[in-house]
Image (cartoon, helix red, strand yellow):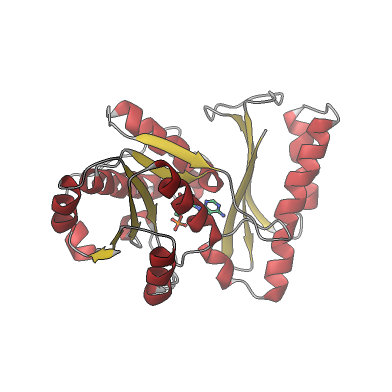
């Protein structure tokens, strides 16, 4: 595995490679969720590139940019053992200049849900993913459905900007008790970690309602909010897979999304129905 810090050096190295490139962009503190994306990239491509970059432009003022877990040595080992060919580990200064051209998230889909609680967050995500795609020029790029709104916006960017990359969305990897794996889970103490499971419970309740034929969005949301009472709920939203509002669950075309805070930790989860 080669660890490359310079964007231009990586671009040059990858231009010289033959075959398909599978790319997994991450912010590090790698867990089994990331490793699942890396395995999928490995299975379908000749070369696997992983990036680890805690991207400052997607953090708002006062968020956890400085506190975000950084585990350089452990992450390098994970990548090496997972058969990664290139680990891209850039500095902020090498990725961003001053007075830059940047991308804006779409006015509606980029400013609902997580985009409401974190205005501008998705513009930062799209800007950095665009840069990373231009450096790596991947055949396929792998993202987690856990960040459903992020995947939808990246797919929109690829379509809107006529980018030549296949986006592969992977199912959420969970802990044994159902909690969605996240680098931010490490922020929680035992009690907060236990309370976070109300998120999983509320998604189970919603799934059970749908299985029994209760498809009314308002009723499902009410039940979920009842289960989520011990947490600070930022939103519970039920939309179709184009992220448009719906009144009734459409089986095969619905996503139920939650953002809730346990202690001070912002947690996202969702289920695709
Ligand atoms: P992050 O390092 O949190 O920015 O995540 C990097 C990529 O891994 C994103 O595409 C995430 O959606 C994905 N990811 C994070 N957690 C999980 C998980 N539990 N299961 C599957 N993918 C995940």
82 horizontally vs 90: left or right: right
**Is residue 108 depicted above or below 196 in this figure?**
above
From the image, which quarter does the N terminus lie in?
Answer: bottom left
160 horizontally vs 205: left or right: left
Q: Nearer the viewer, residue 40 or 168?
A: 40
Give the residue drawn at x 21%, y 48%.
Answer: 135
Give the residue drawn at x 37%, y 52%.
Answer: 25
Give the residue drawn at x 53%, y 65%.
Answer: 184
Q: Position of residue 221 (x, y in %)?
A: 74, 38
Q: Nearer the viewer, residue 161 or 139?
A: 139
Give the residue drawn at x 28%, y 31%.
Answer: 164
Q: Position of residue 271 (x, y in %)?
A: 65, 41
From the image, which quarter does the C terminus lie in?
Answer: top right
Please, which residue is most extreme toward the right here?
212
In this orientation, does residue 65 appear? no
Marker count (numbered):
0
199 horizontally vs 173: left or right: right
Q: Position of residue 83 (x, y in %)?
A: 39, 59
Q: Position of residue 115 (x, y in %)?
A: 46, 44
In this orientation, does residue 45 appear? yes
The image quarter in which residue 171 lies: top right
């Amino acid at each position: 595995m080669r660890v490359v810090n310079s964007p231009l050096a990586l671009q040059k190295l990858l231009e010289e490679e033959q075959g398909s490139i599978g790319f997994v962009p991450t912010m590090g503190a790698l867990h089994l969720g990331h490793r699942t994306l890396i395995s999928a990239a490995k299975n379908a491509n000749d070369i696997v590139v992983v990036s680890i970059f805690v991207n400052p432009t997607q953090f708002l003022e006062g968020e956890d940019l400085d506190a975000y877990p950084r585990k350089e040595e452990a992450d390098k080992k994970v990548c090496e053992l997972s058969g990664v060919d290139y680990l891209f580990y850039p500095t902020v200064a090498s990725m961003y200049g001053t007075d830059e051209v940047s991308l804006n998230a779409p006015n509606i889909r980029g400013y609902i849900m997580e985009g409401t609680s974190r205005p501008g967050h998705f513009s930062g995500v799209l800007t950095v993913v665009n840069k990373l795609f231009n450096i790596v020029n991947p055949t396929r790029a792998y993202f987690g459905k856990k960040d459903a709104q992020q995947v939808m916006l990246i797919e929109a960017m690829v379509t809107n900007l006529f980018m030549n990359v296949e986006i592969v969305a992977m199912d959420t990897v969970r802990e044994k008790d159902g909690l969605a794996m996240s680098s931010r889970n490490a922020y929680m103490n035992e009690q907060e970690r236990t309370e976070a499971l109300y998120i999983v419970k509320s998604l189970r309740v919603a799934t059970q309602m749908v299985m029994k034929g209760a498809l009314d969005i308002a009723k499902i949301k009410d039940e979920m909010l009842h289960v989520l009472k011990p947490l600070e709920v930022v939103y519970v939203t039920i939309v179709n897979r184009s992220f448009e509002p719906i009144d009734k669950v459409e089986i095969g075309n619905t996503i139920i999304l939650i953002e809730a805070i346990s202690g001070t930790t912002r947690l996202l989860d969702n289920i695709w129905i």
